[in-house]
Amino acid sequence: METLIYLAKLALALLLGSLFSKAIGKERLIRSSAIGQTVLVWVLLFFMGINTGQIENIASELGHIGLSALVLTLFGLAGSIVVAIAGSSLFLPKDLDTTIAVARRKEGSLLRYVWDLLKEPLFLISIVILGVLFGMNSTLFDWFKSSYISYLLYMMLFFVGMNLIQRSVSFKTVLRDPSVFLLPIYTIAGTLLGAFGASLVTSFTFCEAAGMLSGFGWYSLSGILISDLGFPLLGSISFLANLMRESFSFFLIPFFGRLGKRYYYPAVSCGGATTMDVVLVLLSKHFGSATTIGSIYHGAATSLCAPVLIPLFF
């Protein structure tokens, strides 16, 4: 029920933004909505870092918990990327947008090309790191509560809703593509494949690894749910693993965006449940507004699966 209420709130924020944009007029809001989305992403990342830095004893526990979470995250992302690329190749035209990456690479040196790929993700991750440092070492943001992030998300989705109207995004146009319906399956199958790989190189069983990764980036749900099931240590690891998945998405989405629009499928698969809110703006920015509805559908589907799959593995 809580998941459905959460999804309903997100849908309401999108709807209100769309209605507001339609009432005021498209042209007058294009610039303001773009600026609003960018600023809100920065603010959201900073306070996400604050929230992480305020975890009790986070510094002393980051050794074991952090390494375990990192290994799980890398395997989960790798599995998702591999399955998404393999699955999407069945539907995508071979000549789709491959000229984007090639054209940009010819503009300058290889070093300049690599810097163009990494500068935006590095900037975004640096905001998260700054937030973590403030959360760990400063009392300036002791007033901040993790629930405040939800309000920032609603504000951001309000701007996304405005953009949907401005770009005339159609549900029928996006969902007519059969590969869009399969996107959540790519993500879930790839994540479970990654969990199997992680179980081979760690002390975790497949069920433990799969359960911890089945938050698909929804770190608040996965950590709390697993802890409530009687596994507090695994809950902490799952929290960080899913938080890392969300954070790594800010690297990977712009990276795949630079490579070309055919890489939308692995990009959205990396984002997991966060593609309907936190990373939605990045996906729309790098792959076009026509992918917005597909990203929301993917995030909603994986979010609905998370509270079902996690208890099954424990």
Image (tube, grey):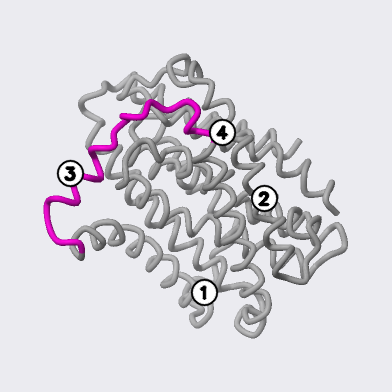
Q: Camera-side residue: 176 or 46?
A: 176
Q: Which residues are magenta?
A: 87-110
The picture places residue 9, in percent across and down from the top left corner, at: 59, 34
Q: Quadrant of residue 10?
A: top right
Residue at (37% x, 37% y) in the render: 284
Gap in angstroms between the C-alphas marked 4 and 3: 28 Å
Instruction: Tell me if mark 3 has few (under 14), some (14-19) or many (20+) residues whose alpha carbon lies within 10 angstroms of its own.
Output: few
C-alpha gap between disc 2 and disc 3: 34 Å
Kindly identify the amino acid type of the residue bearing the numbered disc 1.
Gly
Q: Secondary structure at mark 4?
A: helix
Q: Which residue is mark 3?
A: 103
- Sequence-earlier tag: 4 or 1: 1
Residue for point 41% across, 22% down: 19
Depth check, mark 2 against mark 4: the one in front is: 2
What quarter of the picture does the N terminus occupy?
A: top right
The mark that comes first in sequence, 4 or 3, is 3
Dot label at residue 193:
2
**Residue 183's disc number:** 4
Q: CA distance from mark 4 to mark 1?
A: 35 Å
Seen in the picture, residue 137 relative to 209 is either above or below; the reply is below
Instruction: State left or right for residue 211 relative to residue 10.
Output: right
How busy is the neighbourhood of tag 4: few (under 14 within 10 Å), some, or many (20 plus)?
A: many
